[in-house]
């Protein structure tokens, strides 16, 4: 322990396309939508997180809402940096400090990320006073968060369905043996619902409404044991231009999402086909683990189970599995040195 260690704070960040989560002192201190509202004239931030999310789709010409992360990587460098720094400043125990402490950070990134995108994440972190910045691949963090012992010579398959990407990976001996990163996840599901409403009902709805529909009655199969009730959806009629309301059922949402779910299924099958035989035998015995917000889609586990003929388990808190894993790594940096990208 060095003399200046009390000036260093440790935080673990799950920089997600949809939500950003931060762990500090073993507690999730930030869990906010990854969105910022900017003043167009000055480019200053007006709101961030939940507050900015409420403004989405309701702004006038002087305000724009930006989602700085697209497909799990930084798309708007400036906005993302400001967003991260605002989130860090809002951590309750750091608010009381006179000066910003230097930070030791572990940040998780998608497994299909390029060198350039990786550098963007690292530079963003360094600009908000990150002295030591470690990166970890999302499926690896998810596996640790679920409670799998990744050091064992045993194969485990993780499917992490986030907002921007679906990460599929086979992990053994604290390394990723084969993986696939597909840009089909929560955001694509939301867009599928918007498209379906336009083409089938001539109803134009916004992102927030579509997101609500997905959470309330989204389904991956037509046969659900306890189906959700029909939901009324309001939007603008494309023919008359008037506001209107319609009733939709979960079966319609299943139709809307079907194509995207087939793409996820195909990617899972492709990853399984590249898995070495010994690890395939392990996966047959242990099953497949689902994490990420997308895994909460009704009936998705059943559907993947039918397709792969393997048992599928959903992590107990799928939204936080990745950030929990990142937090575990942060506490035991020496132990997990091999899985970190310095």
Image: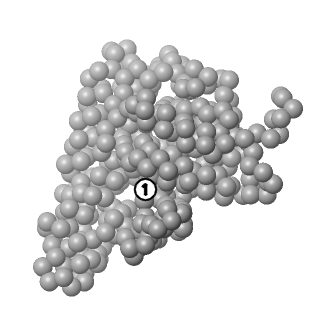
227 left or right of 64 in image: left
Find residue 292 and report its horizontal and vertical position in percent.
Answer: 44, 46
Q: How many marks?
A: 1
Kindly indicate the quadrant of the structure image that contains residue 113.
top left
**Please, which colouring scheme is shown?**
one colour
User: Relative to 309, is 320 above or below?
Assistant: below
Determine the residue located farthest toward the right in the rendered image: 3
Picture residue at 26% right of the left edge, 23% below the top: 273
279 left or right of 124 in image: left
Is residue 224 at all visible to an observer of this figure?
Answer: no
User: Relative to 216, is 114 above or below?
Assistant: above
280 left or right of 203 in image: right
Find residue 61 and report its horizontal and vertical position in percent.
Answer: 38, 73
Find residue 278 and report its horizontal and vertical position in percent.
Answer: 37, 14
Q: Nearer the viewer, residue 118 or 317?
A: 118
Q: Nearer the viewer, residue 39 or 186?
A: 39
* Quarter of the picture holding the C terminus: top right
Picture residue at 27% right of the left edge, 58% below the top: 191
* Quarter of the picture holding the N terminus: top right
Picture residue at 42% right of the left edge, 59% below the top: 66
Kindly indicate the quadrant of the structure image that contains residue 207.
bottom left
Numbered disc 1: secondary structure:
loop
Find residue 86 and report its horizontal and vertical position in percent.
Answer: 61, 56
Residue identifier under label 1:
67
User: Relative to 156, is 37 above or below?
Assistant: below
| Local crowd size for mark 1, using a 10 Å CA cut-off: few (<14), some (14–19), many (≥20) | many
User: Relative to 323, is 243 above or below?
Assistant: below
Is residue 39 at all visible to an observer of this figure?
Answer: yes
Picture residue at 40% right of the left edge, 20% below the top: 177
Kindly indicate the quadrant of the structure image that contains residue 241.
bottom left
């Amino acid at each position: 322990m060095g003399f200046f260690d009390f000036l260093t704070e440790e935080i673990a960040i799950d920089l997600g396309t949809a939500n950003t989560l931060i762990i500090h002192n073993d507690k999730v201190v930030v869990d906010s939508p990854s969105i910022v509202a900017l003043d167009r004239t000055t480019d200053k931030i007006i709101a961030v997180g939940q507050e900015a999310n409420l403004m989405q789709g309701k702004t006038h010409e002087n305000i724009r809402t930006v989602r700085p992360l697209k497909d799990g990587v930084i798309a708007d460098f400036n906005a993302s940096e400001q967003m991260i720094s605002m989130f860090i400043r809002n951590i309750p125990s750091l608010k009381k400090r006179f000066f910003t402490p230097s930070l030791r950070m572990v940040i998780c990134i998608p497994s299909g990320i390029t060198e350039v995108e990786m550098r963007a994440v690292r530079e963003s972190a360094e600009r908000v006073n990150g002295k030591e910045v470690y990166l970890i691949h999302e499926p690896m963090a998810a596996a640790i968060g679920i409670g799998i012992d990744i050091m064992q010579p045993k194969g485990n398959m993780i499917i992490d369905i986030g907002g921007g990407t679906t990460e599929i990976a086979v992990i053994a001996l604290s390394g990723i043996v084969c993986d696939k990163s597909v840009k089909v996840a929560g955001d694509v599901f939301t867009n599928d619902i918007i498209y379906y409403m336009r083409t089938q009902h001539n109803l134009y709805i916004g992102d927030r409404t579509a997101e609500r529909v997905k959470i309330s009655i989204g389904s991956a199969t037509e046969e659900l044991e306890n189906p959700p009730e029909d939901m009324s959806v309001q939007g603008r009629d494309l023919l008359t231009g008037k506001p209107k309301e319609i009733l939709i059922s979960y079966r319609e949402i299943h139709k809307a999402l079907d194509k995207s779910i087939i793409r996820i299924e195909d990617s899972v099958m492709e990853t399984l086909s590249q898995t070495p035989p010994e690890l395939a035998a392990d996966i047959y015995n242990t099953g497949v683990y689902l994490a990420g917000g997308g895994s909460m889609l009704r009936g998705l586990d059943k559907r993947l189970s039918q397709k792969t003929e393997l048992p599928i388990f959903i992590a107990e808190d799928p939204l936080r599995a990745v950030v929990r894993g990142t937090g575990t790594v942060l506490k035991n940096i020496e132990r997990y040195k091999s899985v970190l990208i310095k």
